[in-house]
Image (cartoon, grey):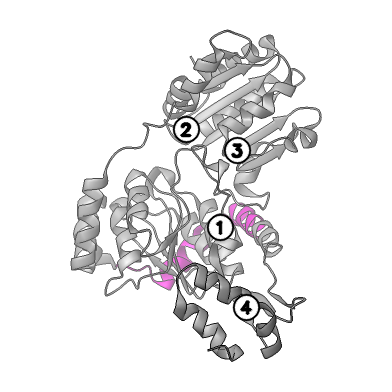
Amino acid sequence: MPRRLDASSPGFAADFETLLADREAVTDDVSAVVGDILHDVRTRGDRALLDFTRRFDRLELEAVGLRFSQAEIDGAAASVPRETADALALAAGRIEAFHRRQVPIDLDFEDEDGVSLGLAWKPLESVGLYVPGGRAAYPSSVLMNAIPARVAEVGRIAMVVPTPDGVVNPLVLAAAKLAGVGEIYRVGGAQAIGALAYGTATIAAVDKIVGPGNAYVATAKRMVFGRVGIDSIAGPSEILVVADRDNDPAWIAADLLSQAEHDPDAQSVLIGDDAGFIDAVVVAVEGQLRTLAKPEVARTSWERHGATILVRTLDDAPSLVDRIAPEHLELAIVEPKAFAARVRHAGAIFLGRHTPEAIGDYVAGPNHVLPTSRTARFSSGLSVFDFLKRTTVIGCTAGALARIGPAAIRLAAAEGLPAHARSVSIRLNRR
């Protein structure tokens, strides 16, 4: 059974701290293995990719080729059933429309001292997109990662996807084609991250790597950060639902399980102000678990990491939400916007009883790549901004330099940097 917390109980503070620390030890320490893999890819390049793919994915890349051909991509896209392809296209259109609204404008102005100032946004030259294979093959993630990069006008997008036993989900390739990605390699794991970071004879290095993966992929991204940029180190999925008694318990149960089915280490939490309603949701979760085709993952997640929190009133919930800083926050309550205005830390907020988190995973438009493991306290979800960099621009006339230069000279002298001071003073005829 999931944890049952009561905010009015004497031991709640300690119980809540235990809940917050629940998954801190979830990440496997695979640093040594990943370090060896990255070193091998850096030194042996394609040959290392061939060897690791044979070992981990049971696939002979020499026979099928490291890169998917355009014919393979087109064939996979053509094999997708029409209704599914239409749904994918609807999702892609909505995702693109939302992200186009994020594109920033350059700044260019002259301030009161006559100094010309600006901020120029430029796209990254190249990005590597990691797409999980096997059980976690999600075409929606391809759209969420590739479309913002294309909207930002990134010059080159290279995608890597593991194909265990040579099998790839056709929808993944169809989504890549729809998103405008034609450079796709059948390699995964830490070795794929190494290839994107260091480059090989076949896969040119990129400037930034984005996309989710297992512990080996996450660790590899952490290790190559600095040589290349990365989006984030994503942990298992999580959802926090704040719900009142006027909900259908079956709806809330389904929402909790929507994240629990992702991973045994995923976390689903319910906050409510009615004990009877919370009990009904727990019963509904158990009933729905019995209907899932593969309930083991969701059951493990719910029983190991799930929790319910009873509060005296929902006015007490925002402070708890901020401490949890959830990836997904559902507000199945009467006035969700007013509640949301009181929340500082959440990756994405879903307003009202008719906005399940799953709608955000696919067709709402905002990105579903979101901060996990309480990192919403200091980070945001993936966006067009992740594929842009900004450069400041400064221009002084002789008059502008005369107005602000003396202050710069004084500050440089105060910091003991005479050459800094001289580079300004020499232009003001102050030797």
Q: Which residue is mark 1?
A: 143
SS at badge 1: helix
Please say whether residue 354 is visible from this viewpoint.
no
Q: Measure the alpha-carbon separation of dots 2 and 3.
A: 12 Å
Of the image marks 1 and 2, the number of the one nearer the N terminus = 1
* Pointers 1 and 2 in contact (C-beta within 8 Å): no
Dividing the picture into quadrants, the one containing residue 424 is: bottom right
SS at badge 4: helix
Of the image marks 1 and 3, the number of the one nearer the N terminus = 1
Q: Which residue is mark 2?
A: 266
Residue 83 forms part of the magenta stretch: yes
Q: Which residue is mark 4?
A: 406
Task: Using the image, tell me which numbered label, if any, was put on residue 328.
Answer: 3
Residue 223 forms part of the magenta stretch: no
Q: Measure the alpha-carbon separation of dots 2 and 4.
A: 58 Å
Q: Is residue 248 left or right of residue 240?
A: right
Which span of residues is magenta-colored?
66-92
Dividing the picture into quadrants, the one containing residue 356 is: top right
Q: Measure the alpha-carbon separation of dots 1 and 2.
A: 22 Å
Depth order, front residue of 425/210? 425
Task: Look at label 2 and name its amino acid.
Answer: Ala
Residues packed near mark 3 inside 10 Å, few (<14), some (14 to 19) or many (20 plus): many
